[in-house]
Image (cartoon, grey):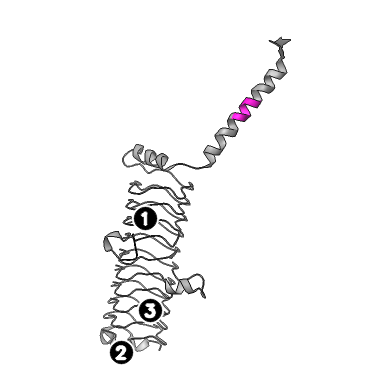
Amino acid sequence: MTTGRFPRFAVALLGLAMLAEAFAVALPAFAAGPSARDIAVLLYKTAPGAHPAMSGRDLRRLDLANLDFKKADLSKANLFGADLSGANLSGTDLRDAMLDRVTLIGAKLDFANLDHASMMRPSTFTDLRFLRAEAPSFKSATLRGVNFFGSFAGSNFSGADLTDSVCAPINKTGFIEYIWRTDFSSANLTGANLTRADMTQSRLSFAVLKNAIMRDVVLQEADLSGADLSGADLSGADLRGADLTDANVTGANLDGVMLHDAKGLESLKGLTEAHNSEKIIR
C-alpha cells in the first residue's frame, strides 16, 4: 500500500531524517550554555526569598556585571573570565566554583561560601591604582581551602574564614609570581580565621589583622610592615624572612612563632605587651 507515490516505509524514513535534522540544530544551542540574558531573566523572575539554582552551569566569559544573584546556588559553576563588576554575590553558594580571571571590581561576596573554589588572577581594579571603592568585599565569607592569587588590596575580609587557603605563588621559581605576589595591602582582616593558610610572600603591609586567628599560618617572606596584629593568635606561625617593620603585636599570642631571618624586629611595636614572647623561635 502506498501514500501518494512513496511507499509507507519511505515516508517513515523521511520523517526520521527530518527529526534527526531538528535535533542536530537544537543540541549545539543547548550545549553552548546559557547567555548573559538568560541569567538576567532567571534572576529577575526569581521570587523573593527563593534562591536560583545554577549549580555546575557553564557561565564562562559572560557579562554578569551589576546583577543581584539573590543568594544563588553557583556551586561547581564555571565562571572563568566572567565580568562580575558591581555584582551582588552576597550569600551565594560558590563552593568548588571556577573563578579564575573573573572581574570583581566593586563586587560584594559578603557571607558567600567559596570553600575550595579557585580564584586565580581576578581583575579587582580598573587600572594599577588602588581605589578602596573598587575593592571586592568578602566580609564573613567562608573561603576554606580556596586557591587564590591576585590583588585584594583594601578588600574587606573581616570575620572571613580562610582556613587552609592558599595564596602563595604556585610556581615557586616563577619571576612573575614573585613580583606580583598576592596583595592584601591595607585590607581589613579583623577577626579573620587564617589557621594553616599558606600566605607565603604575600603583601600585607598596613593590613588590619586585629584579633585574627592565625595559628600555624605560613607567612614566609611576607610583607607585614605597618600591619596591625594586635590581639591576634599567632601561635605556631611561620614568619621566617618576613618583614615586620613597624608592625604592632600588642596583646598578640606569640607562642612558638618562628622569626628566623625576619626583618624589622627592632621596630616591632607592642612586643613587651604580647603574650608568650619568651617562646618565640628566632
Taking 25 as reference, is 88 left or right? left
Residue drawn at 40 percent across, 61 percent down:
143
Q: Is residue 206 shown above or below 72?
A: below
- Residue 67 in percent (x, y) is at 34, 46
- Residue 15 in percent (x, y) is at 64, 22
Q: Name the residue under label 2.
A: 266
> Mark 1 or mark 2: which comes first in sequence?
1
Using the image as rendered, state which of residue 52 and residue 31 is in the foreground.
Answer: 31
Specify the amino acid type for callout 1: Ala
Taking 32 as reference, is 83 left or right? left
Q: Is residue 205 shown above or below 97?
A: below
> Mark 3 or mark 2: which comes first in sequence?
3
- Residue 51 in percent (x, y) is at 37, 44
Crowd tier of the residue under label 3, counting other residues whose Cα lies within 10 Å: few below 14, some 14–19, many 20 or above: many
Which quadrant of the rendered structure holds the C terminus? bottom left
- Select label 3 or label 2 by which is in front: 2
The stretch in magenta equals: 17-21
Secondary element under disc 2, as helix, strand or loop, is helix
